[in-house]
Image (cartoon, grey):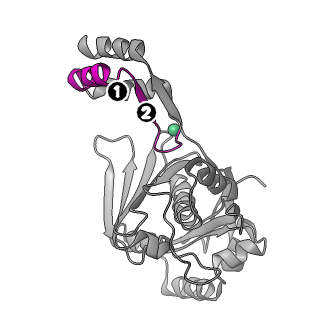
Amino acid sequence: MDDYILRATAADGLIRAFAATTKNTVQTARSLHNTTPVASAALGRLLTAGAMMGTMLKGEKDLVTLQIKGDGPIEGLLVTADSKGRVKGYPFNPNVDIPPKSPVKLDVGGAVGKGYLTVIKDLGLKEPYVGKTELVSGEIAEDLTYYYAKSEQIPTAIALGVLVDTDTSIKAAGGFIIQLMPGATLEVATMLEERITHLKYITELLDRGETPETILDAVLGDMDLEIIDKMPTEFYCDCSRERVEKALISIGEKDLRTILEEDKKAEISCHFCNKVYNFDEADLKKLLDEATSK
Ligand SMILES: [Zn+2]
């Protein structure tokens, strides 16, 4: 099954909902970054949230970036998503290995630690929108819920889950974001809260083979659930040699000359996908010429 995101509304538009299945996305991230199970879970949760938050963007070229910086051994995570379901991301330390909370629960909160979540929305305006909140638990879903309440004043329920198999591959991944829109009555809010409280852990649901459809139906089925669309989602990195060249030129003539004289080559790898771009002496000379002529 390919990854996808469902977008839906309920209660006459007073509720908007997103649900995603992201096993392949997280599996790709795991392979690219060679993450330990707890790092796969942390990154997978943030990628799943990012992919759904990307689909909330209105403009074609809009981007949302989620940055977590914590004092735990993973140090931080960065995820960027566009409005078309494409998402990329990486953990600062993919090798973090800490004991699980229980045989079935990886300690994502322990890996992340205390710190901050920053949400950056690039909406094509002069300045991006930036919201920053303290981490509540480092478990990511709770941290995003708190971000929405505090920074955007939107009551939000978020569940994110990544199930890592015994061979460290990704068995299942997914989640949902459900938000109360302005004008939602206390009755709607109470009903929603009740449903969510009674919902089992998201990983349990995913493990049982529940889909975005059945999960949304379980929460909002009797609240006039209306599926708006189904959008494919994937791990996608848009890096290219051209972009890396531009970045190298932008470090300036002096630094470029130093690299050329001291190393005679440069090996640049993309943070998001680990692809390596090699530049030999002739390449660097060409870039230096370009930097100089600017
Ligand atoms: Zn890349």
Query: Could you tell whether 185 is left or right of 205 in the image?
Result: left
Query: Picture coordinates of residue 29 (x, y %)?
Result: 59, 52
- Residue 124 is one of the magenta-drawn residues: no
Query: Could you tell whether 202 is left or right of 275 in the image?
Result: right
The span picked out in magenta is 252-274
Residue 76 figure quarter: bottom left
Query: Which residue extends farthest left?
Result: 254
Q: Quadrant of the C terminus?
A: top left
Q: Looking at the image, which is closer to me, 147 or 39?
A: 39
Query: Picture coordinates of residue 1 (x, y %)?
Result: 79, 55
Q: Looking at the image, which is closer to me, 152 or 244?
A: 244
Label for residue 248? 1
The three-letter amino acid code for the residue at tag 2 is Ile
Q: Is residue 228 above or below residue 9?
A: above
Classify mark 2: residues with Cα within 10 Å, few (<14), some (14-19) or many (20+): some
Query: Could you tell whether 11 is left or right of 230 in the image?
Result: left
Residue 105 figure quarter: bottom right
Q: Name the residue that disc number 2 marks.
A: 268
In front: label 2 or label 1:
2
Q: Residue at x 52, y 76 (%)?
A: 107
Q: Is residue 120 above or below residue 166?
A: above
Q: Looking at the image, which is closer to me, 170 or 140?
A: 170
Q: Residue at x 49, y 45 (%)?
A: 272
Look at the numbered disc 2 and give the secondary structure of its residue.
Answer: strand
The three-letter amino acid code for the residue at tag 1 is Leu
Label for residue 155? none
Look at the numbered disc 1 and give the secondary structure of its residue.
Answer: helix
Q: Which one is earlier in the sequence, the residue at label 2 or at label 1?
A: 1
